[in-house]
Image (cartoon, rainbow, N blue to C red):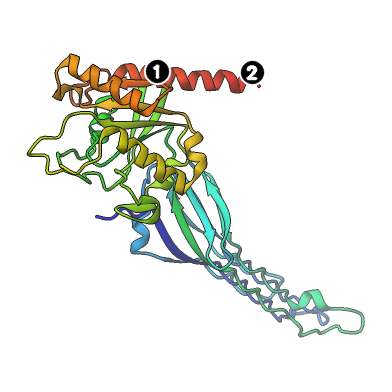
Amino acid sequence: MKLVDEAEITVTAGNGGNGCVGFRREKYIPLGGPDGGDGGNGGDVWLQADENLNTLVDFRHQTKFKAQRGEDGRGRQMYGKGGDDVVVTVPVGTVVHNVDTDEVIGDLTEHGQRLLVAKGGQGGLGNMHFKSSINRAPRQTTPGGEGEARVLKLELKLLADVGLLGFPNAGKSTFVRAVSAATPKVADYPFTTLYPNLGVVSVEPGRSFVIADIPGLIEGAADGAGLGSLFLRHVQRTRLLLHLVDISPMDEFSGAEDMPSPAEQVRAIEHELRKYDPDMLEKPRWLVLNKADLMFEDEAKTAAKAIVAELGWDGPWFLVSAIGREGTWSIMLAVQSFFDQLKREALEE
């Protein structure tokens, strides 16, 4: 099933109710005068962020949302009832674009945050507003205003602290399983992950962060190859990237004899990141050499050092076995320390 992280919807606010022509007619009051009330305002359309949602798949089935029209005014200076608002829930992290103007209307980044996307029409004026010394029986009113109508593009960007990068089958889903309560689908074939999976890593009470398993990237992803740039946008908001690489040697059963070397895989993904958004390479990025369990310990250490040397890697790097959960927790402790340091620096500023 294809990840639905983009959707297009039409929102229409309610029209305002019309003003009323009315005159007060009561016994013993011969000069009652005009008393037509105003129409009610049309309902608004709001978007509201909900942390319980994580995709935009529901908008495949419902794409039109319309608020209620305001009621017309009535006699005896009675105002029409305002139309009910419509509140559309979307996942936290949804960016809202106006399709017609191509502008960003808003960015819903917190649970419960609301964004007005279509304003209801103003209610019309009743004839009681038009009386004067020379017009004691006015029949003028104004109609209700039209509610706003917009076509919106919704784009979901995951709000994760840590993003996992790597070629298909690098072991990212297994890594998420090893360090969090998330249970993404895991299998020994490429493109297992079709959805970004979120996992919460709790180091101790009050110290936790969110990690995202980003579906595997291949060369040409920035231009739409494979799963394409569809998933590159999910990396943009992460504060730290973990670049997973499979260091295990290829065997006759892998079906991937033409796979690039570990160092070539790293460079290929760096190239895709640079093409999509050069600023993404400025993010802190740590190298995680995975699947050490498929080699003897000494061989794995030697291979890891060779890869680091070939890349000229001067940042943090780790040798782990995600499936055996060897070395994974020490990375999570280092990640938490990294975020703690960021918080201290922010407080000092």
Residue beneath the point at 21% across and 44% down: 192
The answer to whether residue 128 is above or below residue 348 is: below
Q: Give SS at disc 1.
A: helix
- Quadrant of the snapshot with the C terminus: top right
How many marks overall?
2
x then y, percent, for residue 122: 67, 68
User: Mark 2 = which residue?
Assistant: 348
* Mark 1 to mark 2 CA distance (whole Å): 21 Å
Nearest the eye: 244 or 180: 244
x then y, percent, for residue 236: 46, 42
Would you say 66 lies left or right of 222 here? right
The answer to whether residue 148 is above or below residue 344 is: below
Please tell me in which quadrant of the rendered image residue 2 appears: bottom left
x then y, percent, for residue 243: 35, 32
Q: Give SS at disc 2.
A: helix
User: Mark 1 = which residue?
Assistant: 334
Labels 1 and 2: the sequence-earlier one? 1
Nearest the eye: 163 or 127: 163
Residue beneath the point at 37% across and 60% down: 59
Q: Can residue 230 be seen in this view?
A: no
Q: Is residue 248 visible?
A: yes
Residue beneath the point at 54% across and 21% down: 343
Name the residue type under label 2. Answer: Glu
